[in-house]
Image (tube, rainbow, N blue to C red):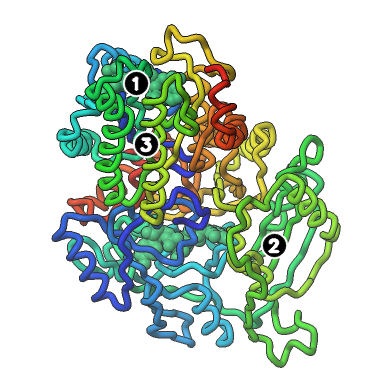
């Protein structure tokens, strides 16, 4: 169960090898975490994340396969998870990949794959878990969106567009889940220094995975619907959203 | 959700009008392999009366008074009957409930399930000590239990937080009163030591005692408080004008908070001003003031839905008890809360008398402190965990009816008889049909 301060006991991570997810789950382990399922596709990163949680004394640490683009498996994934940990207090949706925004590289397959990884797949799996959690009568879904989806930029527009889709999906899902005991928290970080952005020049207001995790914990405590990291993005993006295209294009990114 | 308006969950609600309705819901849930739990008036602060994804039996329609023996002062009523409605019937006839919590809006089933205590605990103990018999709809049928009738199952139900079944009927002994008023002594205490010393002295001479502690006062004024001690007034205590209608009982709820404001109205500034005024307005010492039952026992009931004042995030109440040997835990607790900048809005201090025979009953001889705490502060979870450790280390415990966040690791330290109690529950309910969110959380089960 989630406790009165918002801390969960049973957690599922889609994209179990994510660095942001790791930082969050380590924090949850210091509170009430009893059981976690790390779902992902890369055995090595899952393994490393699992070992750390075991070392931290989390009583039950499980791994299972999750490929965002393999939507045919998502219903079965929910069953695998419930079989192992019984119920889900918190679903963290962390899978994502930046991909490319080079027009020449954007073959139909590449576009479909990127949209699948960042939107279709996470949305499909989230809907499947949302049904199970609604039937449980309680739980919380935390989805990693991005400021990149709030106003899409040239430098990562496929990723940004897919995040915009996922963000909108989650806003609607949150409304659809009203009154079911399941709450959705949308997290919108800016540039986070992780594997995903390795090699890119850090954008202004860059933060670390730990900062995102701290902000999410605060969001759980407050019962927040949306968490911006850093918080000033809420204001900045309100401007950015209404900036004329001609100006927006000229902002270096 | 609970009274603290946090960590809500959703279940299917079944209105029960009779014990037969309850039996039907329980049988259906059993056939479907589901979960069931009784809910009363939802005054538990946390998740005790929640059953996520299961079947909640709303006992409040099952609220009839079945039998009142006005000669011996024994009442038999359905499990959903509230203390409020019992008082309306009994007080004019010269009888009072043996124990009332700080709100009259609790059901008899809820009073048994939490083994509630009142301002008279130092003398009269908790609710379960005054019950003659119960009817309980368990997983495998309906049973009549009492202290002399299957005592093991009876004491597992008292303080058992609904996990032995649904209490459909309660027979309880009442207390004789000559008037519906209380003669009240009010005193100010400048600090915690003075407060504890005076409470101890007043306990010896009065049936009801409690101290309201200014949780924001620190340093040399830490624990400054207003103590009230009262006794049911005799006819002679009343002014002549009141004597004609000495048993009049007419509680009103004049004020209400109609909707939850979008932000909490309980902040440091408002609290500080309120606490200061309360302390200043109290007399240094006043004896023999006549108060009504509602004024003395249920002051918070004067504002309907006051829990909404805490805004959308809600609040929790932390209530601890420590043996008298651990009295300094009370001071430590106030200091730790203040250091973490968690605002202990309303604090209440009282000493408990003897413990009940029920394995899961909260009270034990010692000091109990209750503090309402707004949720949402980043320091709250950590500081409460720290206080839990201090409380457990002193041999104390926290009250599950108020809890929303206790660490599962500490359950068996605080409630050393939990395994014995679970064994009784499971003997009567091997499939563990009766489950609450509270139990899933503190026992860390899925
Ligand atoms: C303002 C306020 C002041 C309070 N002061 C005190 C106090 O001074 N002393 C004290 O001890 N408590 C106090 N409480 C707590 C309250 O007395 C208990 O939580 C009590 O159990 C609430 O009864 P309820 O009918 O609202 O039950 P609910 O909150 O609905 O349920 C509480 C528990 O009882 C179980 N339960 C309810 N009905 C039944 C039934 N028919 N059969 C079996 N189980 C049942 C539920 O499953 C749940 O576990 C206070 C609460 C408030 C809000
Ligand atoms: N870093 C940032 O600047 C930033 C900013 C805003 C939002 N976010 C979002 O935050 C989340 C976590 O990112 P991060 O920074 O922690 O990066 P990360 O460490 O790279 O994590 C991303 C995770 O997604 C997984 N993944 C990628 N494609 C997948 C697919 N097709 N199916 C299943 N899993 C897949 C990766 O698994 P593999 O190991 O198998 O590749 C990896 O575990 C992402 O959703 C990201 O979009 C990041």
Q: Is mark 1 within 8 Å of ligand 2?
A: yes
The x, y position of residue B98, in whole percent, is 52, 70
Protein chain holding label 2: B
The x, y position of residue A51, in whole percent, is 30, 15
- Residue A97, numbered circle: 1
**Which residue is labeled 3 in the image?**
A166
Q: Nearer the viewer, mark 1 or mark 2?
A: 1
| Secondary structure of the residue carrying numbered label 1 | loop
- Residue B205, numbered circle: 2
B148 is higher (above) or lower (below) than B237? above
The x, y position of residue A13, in whole percent, is 32, 29
The single residue placed furthest to the top in the displayed view is: A199
Name the residue at 46% across, 40% down.
A6
Compared across the picture, whether B359 is left or right of B312 comes to left
The reply to whether discs 1 and 2 touch (Cβ–Cβ < 8 Å) is no
Protein chain holding label 1: A
The quadrant in which the N terminus of chain A is found is top left
- Callouts 3 and 2 on one subunit: no
Protein chain holding label 3: A
């Amino acid at each position: 169960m989630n406790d009165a301060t918002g801390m969960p006991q049973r957690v599922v991570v889609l994209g179990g090898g994510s660095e942001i997810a790791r930082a969050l789950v380590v924090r949850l382990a210091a509170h009430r975490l009893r059981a976690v399922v790390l779902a992902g596709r890369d055995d090595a990163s899952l393994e490393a994340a699992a070992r750390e949680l075991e070392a931290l004394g989390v009583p039950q640490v499980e791994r299972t396969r999750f490929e965002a683009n393999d939507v045919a498996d998502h219903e079965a994934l929910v069953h695998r998870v419930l079989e192992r940990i019984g119920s889900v207090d918190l679903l963290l949706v962390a899978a994502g990949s930046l991909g490319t925004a080079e027009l020449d590289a954007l073959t139909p397959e590449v576009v479909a794959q990127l949209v699948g990884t960042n939107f279709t797949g996470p949305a499909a799996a989230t809907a499947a878990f949302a049904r199970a959690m609604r039937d449980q009568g309680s739980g919380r879904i935390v989805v990693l969106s991005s400021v990149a989806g709030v106003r899409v930029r040239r430098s990562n527009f496929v990723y940004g567009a897919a995040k915009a889709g996922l963000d909108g999906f989650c806003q609607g899902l949150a409304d659809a889940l009203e009154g079911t005991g399941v709450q959705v928290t949308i997290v919108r970080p800016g540039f986070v220094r992780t594997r995903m952005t390795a090699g890119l020049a850090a954008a202004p207001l860059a933060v670390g995975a730990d900062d995102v995790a701290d902000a999410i914990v605060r969001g759980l405590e407050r019962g927040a619907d949306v968490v911006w990291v850093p918080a000033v993005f809420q204001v900045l993006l309100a401007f950015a959203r209404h900036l004329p295209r001609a100006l927006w294009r000229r902002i270096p990114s | 959700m609970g009274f603290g308006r946090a960590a809500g969950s959703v279940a299917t609600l079944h209105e029960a009008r009779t014990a037969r309705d309850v039996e039907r819901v329980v049988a259906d849930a059993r056939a479907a392999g589901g979960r069931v739990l009784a809910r009363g008036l939802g005054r538990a602060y946390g998740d005790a009366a929640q059953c996520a994804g299961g079947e909640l039996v709303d006992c409040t329609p099952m609220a009839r008074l079945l039998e009142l023996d006005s000669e011996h002062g024994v009442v038999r009523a359905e499990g959903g009957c509230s203390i409020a409605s019992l008082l309306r019937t009994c007080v004019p006839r010269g009888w009072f409930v043996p124990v009332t919590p700080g709100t009259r809006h609790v059901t008899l089933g809820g009073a048994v399930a939490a083994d509630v205590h009142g301002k008279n605990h130092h003398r009269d103990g908790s609710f379960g000590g005054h019950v003659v018999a119960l009817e309980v709809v368990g997983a495998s049928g309906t049973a009549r239990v009492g202290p002399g009738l299957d005592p093991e199952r009876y004491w597992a139900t008292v303080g058992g937080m609904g996990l032995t079944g649904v209490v459909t009927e309660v027979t309880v002994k009442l207390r004789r009163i000559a008037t519906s008023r209380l003669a009240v002594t009010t005193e100010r205490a400048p600090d915690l030591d003075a407060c504890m010393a005076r409470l101890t002295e007043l306990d010896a001479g009065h049936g009801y005692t409690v101290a309201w502690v200014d949780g924001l006062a620190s340093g040399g004024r830490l624990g400054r408080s207003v103590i009230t001690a009262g006794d049911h007034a005799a006819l002679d205590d009343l002014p002549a004008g009141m004597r004609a209608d000495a048993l009049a009982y007419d509680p009103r709820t004049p004020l209400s908070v109609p909707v939850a404001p979008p932000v909490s109205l309980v902040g440091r500034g408002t609290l500080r001003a309120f606490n200061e005024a309360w302390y200043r307005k109290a007399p240094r010492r006043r004896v023999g003031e006549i108060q009504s039952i509602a004024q003395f026992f249920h002051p918070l009931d004067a504002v309907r839905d006051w829990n909404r004042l805490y805004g959308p995030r809600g609040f929790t109440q932390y209530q601890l008890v420590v043996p008298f040997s651990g009295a300094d835990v009370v001071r430590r607790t106030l200091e730790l809360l203040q250091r973490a900048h968690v605002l202990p809005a309303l604090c209440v201090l009282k000493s408990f008398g003897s413990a009940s025979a029920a394995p899961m009953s909260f009270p034990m001889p010692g000091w109990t402190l209750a503090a309402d705490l707004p949720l949402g502060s980043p320091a709250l979870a950590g500081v409460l965990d720290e206080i839990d450790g201090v409380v457990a280390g002193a041999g104390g415990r926290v009250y599950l009816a108020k809890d929303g966040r206790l660490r599962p690791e500490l359950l068996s330290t605080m409630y050393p008889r939990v395994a014995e109690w679970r064994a009784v529950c499971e003997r009567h309910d091997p499939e563990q049909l009766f489950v609450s969110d509270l139990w899933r959380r503190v026992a860390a089960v899925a």
